[in-house]
Image (spheres, rainbow, N blue to C red):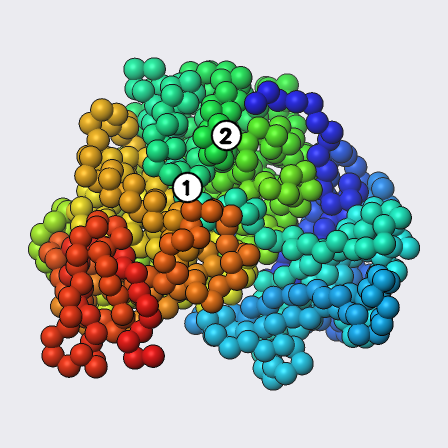
Amino acid sequence: MAREDTDRIESGDGSHHPGPPRFVTVGEGLINPNGDEMETRDELAPWNLDRNPDGEFVWNVADAPEESTATPTDAPIAEFVPDVPGEYTLVLEAPDGEHELTVRAFPQQADKSGQPRPQVRLEATVDTDRDSDPNRNPNRIQFAATTKLAGSDATADDETQTDLTVEYYIDDRSALELDDRNGIRTAELVEQELEYPVRVYAVAVTDDGRYSIPDAVELDSEPGADGVQLERPFEPPSWVEDAVVYEIFTRRFPDQDDPTFETIADRVDHLADLGVDVLWLTPMLETDRGFGTPDSQGGPHGYHTDDYLQVDPDLGTLADFEALVDACHDHDIRVVFDLVINHTGDTHPFYEAAVDDSHPEHERYRDWYRWEDFEERDADTYFGWDGIPNLDHSNPAVRAYLLEVIDFWAPLVDGFRTDVAWGVPLGFWTEVSDRLRRYDAEFFLLDETIPSDVEMGGGRFHMHHDDVLHDTLESVAAAAVSADGAGGTGRNEEGWRREAEAEAENSDTDTENAVADTFSDMSVDASDGASAILDAVDERARRGTHPDSEWLLYVENHDTDRFLTEHGRDAQQAAAAATFTLPGSPMLYYGQETGLTERREPMNWGAFDAALLEYYHQLCDLRQSVPALQRAAALERVSYEASTKYAVAYARDASTADRAVQSDQTDAEDGPERVLIVLNFSPEPTTVRVNERVSGPDLLSGAQVVSQSDGDESDWERTVTVDSAVVLESEGSATE
């Protein structure tokens, strides 16, 4: 894939307009302070700063609720904290004119913890009631929204719901307005010969002011055209919806005698044979944490960037990287680039200039970073990681440069996974998402936030790391192993966390200690056993995730210890089956399928655990061939009785799904539309009694694991024997 010259990529309509309406909470607003390591940042910023980073930008309040005295800070990239609920109109004075921005501030909540958040789905329909001539074009577009409280199955439209209302907004870049029935006449769109699509937003609001992630519909019309195109701008690319993702630790995956892009390309057959759809490469840019980095500093990981526009020469050239991407594409595998723009390495030339008073570029770059104390050269960092100083995204020059970085890599890959996404302001991600979508509607964005942040959905990222499910799988497995007294390391949950803390005290905390283990424990209460994994899935909705948000499901990654080592083979297989059978996109970390036991050790080419590899082959095959395991299938809780609380049963059902929203994988058409999944995290086999009319062999192993239940069959229809995981075709509940 040769890099071609492309037109300049631009955000929005190409102007400095600051983007779509903003929805915030009184007293919290749009702020981007130092510290707050686990908090999401935000701020007001002109778009397309790569065109004019040195321009003069001034923010003012043009309209505000009565009694408000809130004003933006005096900076091109400003902070703004509304002090009264209501709607504010801000004006950005920019070199290309004045731009208005709506900021809707909702009341501050006394206690938001545990409160379900509203969700909204906006629909646009063509109103033909008043047009009796079928040869004429429809003359009106009607907008309506369905709403619900997160986690509830009940929905209602905004006219009948008593405790939820819907507010509608049109992007401030448009001169159009919604009529009193929340519609737009088609003629208005056509007459204006739009140069930029019109976007309409809906936000659901509770009586006490809790509000949803906004949903949107985009309208476009070509000059002279009679019709209007409707699009859903927040939907993920179709190729991602049922994808199997594979993360490689770039410098440990290839042939260790010659670890290069070329030898990674030589190993792509392994991924294709496994059934991988997306390859996520950990950083491969120029870095001081490449080959030769000791294990005490995390091994050769590359997250300390020294040059954003150069690949690590030890891995090869840019042309070699492009050849690797081509090899993946030849196997129908997409490539995701690990974008690290929250921080640089402390050996980056920009940082070296910033800390050196005698450097000719010192004055320019000292303001590119955040400082706890500049005189002491004490940079703002996360978690005491002194080697990765945080960039200051409130500096227009930083944003301009990062947009150039994004523009450089976007034509070369299929998507970005963004490291420490929570450290970069939300408004910047909104611009990046808009920019990339307008460049390539199929470009994919995956965020890392700890804890996972639903604000990253709805016009920012398509997919989020599901750290809640990951930590719950860890908690369930640790408790199961501890209760049994066998398997894995024999440590209970407190034991392995205490060991992680001890490692941190006696090693370079820069990278040795896993982020997920030390800084985050997002698991739901696992005291009731394996059913907690279903609670973890419910937790996504309770927090108000956007309806189009996808979730990356994983049992381990480059920041965690190996599940196999910590909890044993049976628990690892049960956890893996959970990631392949619950709603979301399963991810494998290199070597998970071949028996690796250390977090970042070289891939064990030529020494695979053949039985384990076959198990993962079966998981991938099932995921891609069974409609009931894909995105459109519903997750159902079922009644069951188990001999251990570390077993759980649930169903996936695609029988009522709209097949049009499923992926176009033709081999999935003939598979079962309902399956029962039974998982067992304990090291010993167990039996589970269910009311499902299951039959046939286990779709994973081919073994016969089902028998008639003894006792009262009206209570329990079948008994299932499970080692770690079984997937069974089901005709539905026996009590229906």
Within 10 angstroms of label 2, few (less than 14), some, or many (20 or more) residues? Answer: some
* Residue at which label 2 appears: 329
Is 159 placed above or below 660 here? Answer: below
> 217 or 207: which is nearer to us?
217
Q: Residue at x 60, y 42 (%)?
A: 442
Indicate which disc, 2 or 1, sits on the residue closer to the N terminus: 1
Amino acid under disc 1: Val
Q: Is residue 598 visible?
A: no
Q: Quadrant of the N terminus?
A: top right
Q: Residues within 10 Å of mark 1 (few under 14, many from 20)?
A: many
What residue is at 38 percent from the left and 38 percent from the top? 275
User: Which residue, given by chain and number where applicable, does mark 1 sit on?
Assistant: 245
Residue type, label 2: His
Check disc 2 and report its element: helix, strand or loop.
helix
Q: Residue 525's image quarter?
A: bottom left
Residue at figure coordinates x 63%, y 62% from the top left: 214
User: Whole-percent x and y of residue 189?
Assistant: 85, 57
- Would you say residue 132 is visible in this rendering? yes
- Could you tell me which secondary element the residue under label 1 belongs to? strand
Q: Is residue 726 left or right of residue 456?
A: left
Q: Position of residue 321 (x, y in %)?
A: 49, 22
How many discs appear?
Answer: 2
Q: Give the residue drawn at x 47%, y 46%.
A: 665
Q: CA distance from mark 2 to mark 1?
A: 14 Å
Q: Nearer the viewer, residue 700 or 85?
A: 700
